Amino acid sequence: MAKTRVRTKSAIARANRSVCLGRESKMASGRGHVNQEIKQHFATKEGCYRLLDLSVYSRPNKVPYNAQQCHPVRVSFVTVKDQGGCNDRIAFNVGRELYFYIYKGVRKMLITPSIVGPICRERYEAADLTKPLDKRLYKGTIPTCHDFNLLTRSAESLELLIGFSAGQVQLLDPVKHEVNKLFNEERLVDKTKVMCLKWIPGSENLFLVAHESGNMFVYNKEHPAGVGPPQYALMKQGPGYSIHSGKSKTTRNPVCKWTIGEGSINEFAFSPDCKHIATANQDGFLRIFDFDMQTLCGVMKSYFGGLKCVCWSPDGKYIVTGGEDDLVTVWSFFERRVIARGVGHQSWVQVVAFDPYTTSVSGRGGVDDSDEEEIEQNGVAPSQRASSVTPEDKNVTSYRFGSVGQDTHFMLWDLGEDVLRPQRPRGRSVRATISLSNSHITSTHSLSNGPISHDTNHSGSGNAVAPCPVSSFDAPKNLTQVHSLTISMESLVSTGNVSPGTVLCPRMEDVCILEPLVAKKVANERLTALSFREDCIVMACHEGFIRTWARPGKVVRCAPNGDSSLSEDDDTEDHNSDALPASPLSS
């Protein structure tokens, strides 16, 4: 049985005391680990992960780093079928610039015999920073996030959405070097920074944009902007959220508006089955919605401070969050409760992500070899897309997820059966059950902003609407009545003042405390991006360096005679040099 690294009671007490003190964020230099060197390799039970120090993507011309002016560096990947064999593409933003490159990863490893003896030297093709496929320099605004359209991708054309600090959204084709469209150009929809945007799974035209104001908007790329500020009509509301549809008689953007919590929506994530969406808010609440039905399914509160990031497990059964409490928190979708917290970061946790290639899940909702290509390209396994979450979790062995933070540290965590299936639960079961019987809708048709394939009108000649299955709902009298939570839960959510020791935020001693499997300093500045790929792990830091860590046995070596073989890892090899970026190259 897979074991999770769990702390003892004394360790829990120390962690509880340190968290209760409310450590402030250690910016940039990562205080608390200042004497540690940057690591170039780390070992797990699978083998040794190695930093490819020549495969570093960044600006072609290095400029002095300014922490006050630089927005977080974000990284987006897409895979296309290229006749040249280089199928991966990478986009990243640094300051006011956006770059688009061919991503070579770890597949270009060469072996050459040494002049002095039989020892072989490893060489691989370095990233050529002088030849970006596309480069953009923006004036007056700064790119903050981006996402590729996976349904319309090809080697000849790509659709890349880009969000900006002034609230605009750009639709760009980096292959054809064309700007297709600009949304919220006059900033009439929202004037605040775009925090997160993503194409809605299953739709070629719809995408979702979250702003610092706490609003999320559904756009259709085929719809026009309209004249004047948009008008909205209330569709639904509940504790801490409301949903509005567009009131215009003519087709225009945005299609609908979600207002969630207080303060910024820092990140949102769709579930693997494309039915639910989880939002991480600056007010410290994790909220999970049924995206098509527009109903609230679950709520969690951080230990303190805002939540910065959120992600789903590959089978959709667990959600992990990170934030200003320096913790990673594991929330069970079924049990509607926190089941574990990870203690190890010394500053805010910026990104959390599950590793689908080392997560051991069998049976229904499992990850197997046949699904790896689908997960790599789309983030969803075919077997998971239509599967539903069941309370019988008999086949799960362990989950692996990672986190990066402002303390410049990368951490790996294992979530094993001793946490997922304890012998006896502590106390009575507490489930934040939501009764859908009192959910109300304003019409017999619900706006199709979810990931289902009702958006058949690709010409954009009308609003995308889908019938709502009203048979499971009571006929409403008050069309704007809030959804019915349990009385205690509704009170906690409504007040927003949730202290540790409640259903939404249990005390540290009431949940399992995880210790990191790996905790390594991997950068000089705060980390802002983390991506698990089939053959590597990719991380980005605030300075603008995107580094690649090769997985054990995934580096392909090519001998001088043309033969190829998988690399053999030597865990005892000494790496004394820091993980420095490639030499500056002129543009």
Image: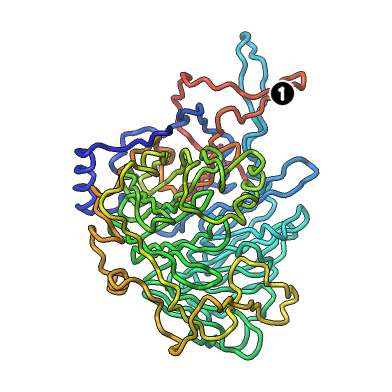
Colouring convention used in this rendered image of the protein: rainbow
Q: Is residue 249 above or below residue 378?
A: below
Q: Position of residue 297 (x, y in %)?
A: 44, 66
Q: Residue furthest top?
A: 117
Q: Position of residue 349 (x, y in %)?
A: 38, 51
Front residue of this view, candidates 241 and 34: 241
Q: Position of residue 453 (x, y in %)?
A: 67, 68
Marks counted in the figure total: 1
Rendered-image quadrant of the N terminus? top left
The residue depicted at 58 percent of the width and 60 percent of the height is 274
Q: Is residue 308 above or below residue 18?
A: below
Q: Position of residue 106 (x, y in %)?
A: 62, 34
Q: Residues within 10 Å of mark 1 (few under 14, many from 20)?
A: some
The residue depicted at 31 percent of the width and 74 percent of the height is 494
Q: Is residue 6 above or below residue 540?
A: above
Front residue of this view, candidates 116 and 471: 471
Q: Quadrant of residue 532?
A: top right
The residue depicted at 45 percent of the width and 64 percent of the height is 288
The residue wearing badge 1 is: 564
Q: Is residue 152 above or below residue 471?
A: above
Front residue of this view, candidates 322 and 298: 298
Identified by mark 1, the residue type is Ser
Q: Quadrant of residue 228?
A: bottom right
Secondary structure beneath dot 1 equals strand
